[in-house]
Image (cartoon, rainbow, N blue to C red):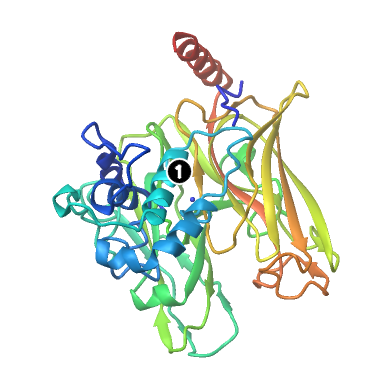
Amino acid sequence: MLGKFHGALFFVVLTSSLAVFGAGTTFAAEDEVPTFSKDVAPIFQAKCEACHRPNSIAPMSLVTYQESRPWARSIKDRVSTRQMPPWHIDRTVGISDFKNDRSLTDTEIDIVVRWVDGGAPRGNPADMPAALEWPDQAKWYLADRFGGPPDLIIESDPFTMPAESNDAWWKPISETGLTEPRWVRAIEVRPGTEAGRKITHHVIARLEQDETDPLLQNPNATADNDPLANSGLFMEWAVGKEGRVMRPDSGVLMLPDSRIIWDVHYSASGEEITDNVRLGVYFYPKGEEPKNRQVLHLMGATGGGSLDIEPNSIAVTEGYFPLKRAARIESFQPHMHLRGKAMAIEAILPTGRREILSHVGDFNFNWHNTYQYTDNVAPLLPKGTLMKVTAWHDNTAANRANPDPNVWVGYGDRTVDEMAHAWVNVTYFTDEEYDELVEARESADNNN
């Protein structure tokens, strides 16, 4: 049962940002020229300021009219072509409802375009919405939500990146220090310092432990002594990703003597910077155990020999992952490099029926979007479902991001190498729980 489908991710949009679209907000009629204060500023607050604000990662701030006006024509170009905000899901394929959807609606795009075409007027300053208060990047993002800082903070060994250097991959191992099993309800990963954000491209934290449940072991491990045999992805950080929060009554189980295997991608920034990575873990209170276990799986082509991309060609790669238990797919995040073009995730049911869950049709390596399905459409899949991840790579001169279309490309960590996998967050259920969820989903759909 895949739920109710509707034919048709580097930033978390805060709930407070969305509040500006309440009942009191009205936009200009189609025959009027929109103004910044009344019509455009609310859109920028909800969909742009997460990055485009002072001391954030975007190259310019769009908080005030004075800051936004010089960029009007560029804004129109990026918005009308849907390059910004970065959201690369194909709306015409599979599921279209996401908790963290930061794309602009057709109406919002029309307002911005008409504002620019009409001379980008400021309008009445009294119409400006109240300024948003964004969290301090020096603080733990989820601390207010959970009533304090993380319960456990794990740090990697420090790494010094020279001012000028090839990219580096830092792979230390950190002990968690746990002496008893603990259930996790939220996770954050972040560079240790503000300067570290200049050199940290992305961070992968894997949880390595002696897995007690063989059905949840990594089916793509190459041998029993493969470090991935008993580990799942714990958390990944990239520009715009703030944290991972488990759905109610589900969590990640950390076992005693577990370790974090780091994989940190650093890039030179023109100055020597020493930094480390910090991982914050928020536990469920002792004695409060969630019913269901959640695992962040790596699905698709996951290792050496899985990719072989000829020069001046378009390549298609497939990878499979069996669900050994009934499950709900919580989110989907494609991962490729500079030649990555598109990726689809598909469920092949035990009956042989196939359903495309999501398709990213315009992948961009600069943005690591996680697409989080809303509660009413998150795919419910029976035991025995085969997950299929298909990746397309464009190794031709038509790909403007391609560093060299005349070389063979294989699997590897370097940005000029390639990958073709997805991070897929899965919550597992018993067959009885799955049947109950399907029945509840069908009942809710029939009542709508």
Task: Tell me residue 384's x, y (percent).
Answer: 70, 28
Compared to 38, does 195 lie above or below?
below
At horizontal 48% and vertical 10% (from top left) the residue drawn is 443
**For the residue labelled by badge 1, is the local secondary structure a helix, a strand or a loop?**
strand
**Which residue occupies the extreme left position in the image?**
126
Kind of residue sitting beneath label 1? Val
Q: Is residue 136 above or below residue 166?
A: above
Q: Which image quarter: residue 76?
A: bottom left
Please state the horizontal and vertical placement of residue 278, each as a whole percent of the image.
38, 66
Closer-to-camera residue (178/15): 15
Q: Is residue 248 left or right of residue 83?
A: left
The reply to whether residue 242 is in sight is no
Q: In screen coordinates, is 445 left or right of 14?
A: right
Q: Quadrant of the N terminus?
A: top right
Residue depicted at 46% across the width and 53% down the height: 85
Side of 93 relative to 348 (left or right): left
| Circle 1 residue | 252
